[in-house]
Image (cartoon, helix red, strand yellow):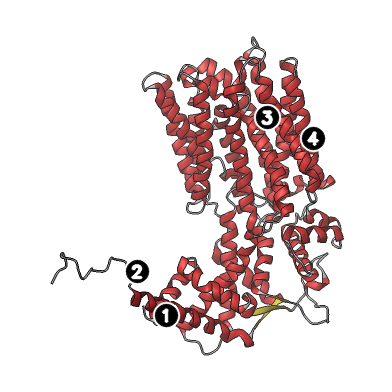
């Protein structure tokens, strides 16, 4: 391959995907190390100190009194802190990558605009190379996971595991826990979990603000422990109902607190990943409850099922001394907090004070961009309702939360064992299959998040679930075989996980400005828990009185959801890259001045030429030794089958 062909290949591939091909990554790895990173391109001089309370003076002025500089990657991290919500949400990775790509494109264009005498081809090539170097440095944050962050992930994921576990733990032992109880009493025990949820969601947010994220998380752990203890030693069904209410309270509390806590500890490039981990912890908790039911859903061992909550919360407390407070919460209370700086140093694995101060600046700037302008959640919601666009988005989010629960998904997780009774020989097997499919479907949903629009996924999800409901009803009527009912329930769960499961939560983080996310999340959480309670209480009666038509009402809700998504719901992938680039250009053109690194400016082309020469030498050596891969097998000269 000739040098100019190699250059054209790289240039074209990089312009198309910002250098994401394996060849481009391998070739540029040596260049980045030799050049010293994005600062070899140039730096952004801070011409005007942002008018933000609490921003360290060191942000704009160096120790010797000269203006401070930010490398392109440092400014990119600042943009991520400003745009990515301080919350860990499943599927947020796409937003993180969109912002990173938009900034890399913006910074590369700024860099190219300072270069004189370049041909159009050279400008494109330099822009491609610059954007790749900047992206690599920005994405490096996602590779730095420190020990304090690991402990926080373990404790927080354990709380979400308990949410999932207690969602599914009442599914199997209905017939063995205090036999002879009424349908109403058992329904109340199941639904009490969802009664406590909205109260926990309200209190969780308030306690996180008053006592700090760490203190609130420990209080949540003690609440889980209390509920687990009462449920384990319960002498009657009434105690189980009280215990379920307490555990539901802790679960609602956790559903609000855990995303905030992890989102404020992790760098922006890790928040989507941590949200995904906690979602997997939840669905694995449901599956774990199903698996434990095989040995322990008996009249003599059912208390073991309930003791799991107690044991895991005790393990959480063992890890509690290693938990750190949220630096964002500390800096909001005192911008000069030394404790916040110490925690940031440990969380990010930093060594030098100026690095710590730069990260403090990122937190402060991010907080200023996402800070609520109104003092209370109610005031923020009133502000959102007063704007037509925000009102439509908020109402859409609420409707999707209602549809998510009224689609009947928790009827499956609460009562699938009784639902499968008479359909298959061992209902526990059917329940466990559903739990396993739920975990696998969550992974599939993660893959689809990157390639499909949110509206499209809602349409596929609601449409697929509707058809599954039709098949379930026909199977229960005897028109189709019983095994098709089992298959249809699993298909129903799969379609839920790719759309109606994660997207009602994800669009809140993607569509709203950071200052609205917390209030919108809080409202959506309370609506979701309230609808969860209604389903948990009503489904046993639906199953008893509607019989084979018990999934009929869910089908009607799903038909409405499909029509709503088709005709009313806007596409919800958020701000486009073009809009982000325009915003970055407008904001940074006043406060930042880009100064090219004249000394190292030519080093970029030099290093890439060296890389190309090395690549050509390796190819020539492989050709001479006969090991070069031409894309086909070379003809063997000794073969009798060769053509003359």
Residue placed under numbered mark 3 in the picture? 194
| Marked residue nearer the N-terminal end (3 or 2) | 3
| Residue 502 marker | none
Residue at x 35%, y 75% (from the top left corner): 625
Dot 4 surroundings within 10 Å: few (below 14), some, or many (20 or more)?
some
- Ranked by sequence position, the earlier of labels 4 and 1 is 4
Q: Nearer the viewer, residue 222 or 315?
A: 315
Q: Position of residue 104 (x, y in %)?
A: 58, 70
In three-dimensional space, the C-alpha distance between marks 4 and 2, rounded to whole angstroms, equals 62 Å
**Mark 4 or mark 3: which comes first in sequence?**
3
Labels 1 and 2: the sequence-earlier one = 1
Q: Which mark is residue 629?
A: 2
- Judged from this view, the residue extending furthest toward the front is 638
Decide if residue 508 is on the left or right side of residue 14: right
**Residue ranking furthest to the bottom:** 117
Q: Does label 3 or label 1 sit earlier along the sequence?
A: 3
Q: Secondary structure at mark 2?
A: loop
Q: Are marks 1 and 2 in contact (CB under 8 Å)?
A: no
The local crowd at label 2, few if under 14, some if 14 to 19, many if 20 or more residues have their Cα within 10 Å, is few
Please tell me whether mark 3 or mark 1 is closer to you in this view.
1
Residue identified by numbered label 1:
617
Spot occupied by residue 117 in the image (x, y as percentages of width and height)? 52, 90
Marks 4 and 3 sit apart, C-alpha to C-alpha, by 19 Å
Q: Is residue 427 visible?
A: yes
Q: Secondary structure at mark 4?
A: helix
């Amino acid at each position: 391959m000739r040098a100019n062909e190699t250059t054209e290949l790289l240039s074209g591939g990089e312009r198309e995907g910002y250098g994401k091909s394996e060849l481009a990554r391998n070739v540029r790895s040596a260049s980045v190390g030799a050049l010293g990173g994005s600062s070899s391109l140039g730096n952004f001089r801070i011409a005007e100190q942002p008018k933000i309370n609490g921003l360290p003076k060191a942000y704009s002025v160096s120790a010797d009194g000269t203006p401070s500089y930010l490398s392109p990657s440092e400014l990119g991290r600042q943009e991520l802190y400003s745009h990515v919500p301080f919350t860990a949400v499943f599927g947020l990775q796409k937003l993180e990558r969109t912002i990173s790509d938009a900034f890399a494109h913006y910074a590369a264009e700024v860099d190219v605009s300072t270069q004189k005498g370049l041909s159009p081809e050279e400008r494109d090539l330099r822009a491609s190379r610059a954007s790749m170097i900047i992206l690599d440095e920005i994405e490096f944050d996602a590779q730095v996971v420190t020990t304090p962050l690991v402990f926080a992930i373990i404790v927080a994921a354990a709380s979400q595991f308990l949410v999932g576990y207690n969602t599914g733990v009442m599914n199997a032992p209905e017939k063995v826990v205090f036999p002879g109880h009424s349908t109403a009493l058992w329904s109340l025990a199941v639904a009490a979990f969802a009664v406590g949820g909205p109260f926990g969601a309200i209190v969780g947010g308030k306690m996180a603000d008053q006592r700090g994220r760490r203190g609130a998380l420990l209080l949540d752990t003690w609440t889980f422990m209390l509920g687990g203890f009462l449920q384990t030693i319960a002498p009657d069904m009434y105690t189980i109902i009280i215990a379920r209410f307490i555990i539901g309270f802790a679960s609602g509390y956790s559903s609000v607190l855990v995303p905030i806590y992890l989102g404020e500890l992790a760098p922006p490039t890790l928040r989507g990943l941590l949200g995904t981990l906690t979602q997997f912890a939840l669905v694995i908790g449901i599956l774990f409850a199903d698996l434990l039911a095989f040995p322990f859903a008996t009249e003599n061992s059912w208390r073991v099922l309930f003791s799991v909550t107690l044991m895991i919360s005790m393990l959480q407390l063992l890890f509690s001394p290693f938990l750190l407070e949220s630096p964002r919460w500390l800096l909001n209370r005192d911008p000069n907090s030394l404790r916040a700086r110490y925690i940031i140093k440990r969380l990010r694995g930093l060594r030098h004070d100026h690095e710590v101060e730069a990260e403090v600046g990122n937190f402060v700037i991010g907080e200023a961009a996402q800070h609520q302008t109104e003092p209370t959640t109610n005031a923020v919601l009133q502000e959102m309702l007063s704007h037509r666009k925000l009102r439509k988005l908020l109402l859409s989010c609420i409707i999707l939360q209602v549809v998510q629960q009224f689609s009947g998904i928790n009827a499956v997780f609460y009562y699938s064992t009784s639902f499968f009774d008479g359909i298959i020989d061992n209902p526990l097997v059917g329940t466990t299959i559903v739990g396993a499919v739920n975990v696998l479907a969550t992974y599939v949903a993660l893959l689809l998040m990157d390639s499909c629009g949110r509206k499209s996924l809602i349409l596929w999800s609601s449409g697929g679930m509707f058809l599954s409901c039709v098949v379930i009803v026909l199977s229960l009527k005897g028109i189709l075989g019983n095994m098709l009912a089992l298959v249809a329930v699993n298909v129903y769960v799969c379609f839920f996980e790719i759309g109606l499961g994660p997207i009602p939560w994800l669009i809140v983080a993607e569509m709203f400005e950071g200052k609205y996310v917390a209030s919108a999340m809080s409202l959506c959480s309370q609506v979701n828990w309230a609808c969860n309670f209604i389903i948990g209480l009503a489904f046993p009666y639906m199953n008893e009185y509607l019989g084979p038509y018990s999934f009929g009402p869910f089908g009607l809700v799903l038909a409405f959801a499909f029509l709503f998504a088709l005709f009313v719901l806007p596409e919800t992938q958020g701000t486009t890259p073009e809009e982000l680039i325009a915003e970055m250009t407008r904001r940074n053109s006043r406060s930042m001045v880009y100064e090219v690194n004249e000394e190292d400016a030519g080093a970029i082309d030099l290093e890439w030429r060296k890389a190309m020469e090395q690549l050509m030498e390796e190819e020539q050596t492989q050709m001479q030794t006969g090991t070069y891969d031409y894309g086909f097998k070379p003809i063997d000269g000794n073969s009798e089958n060769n053509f003359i």
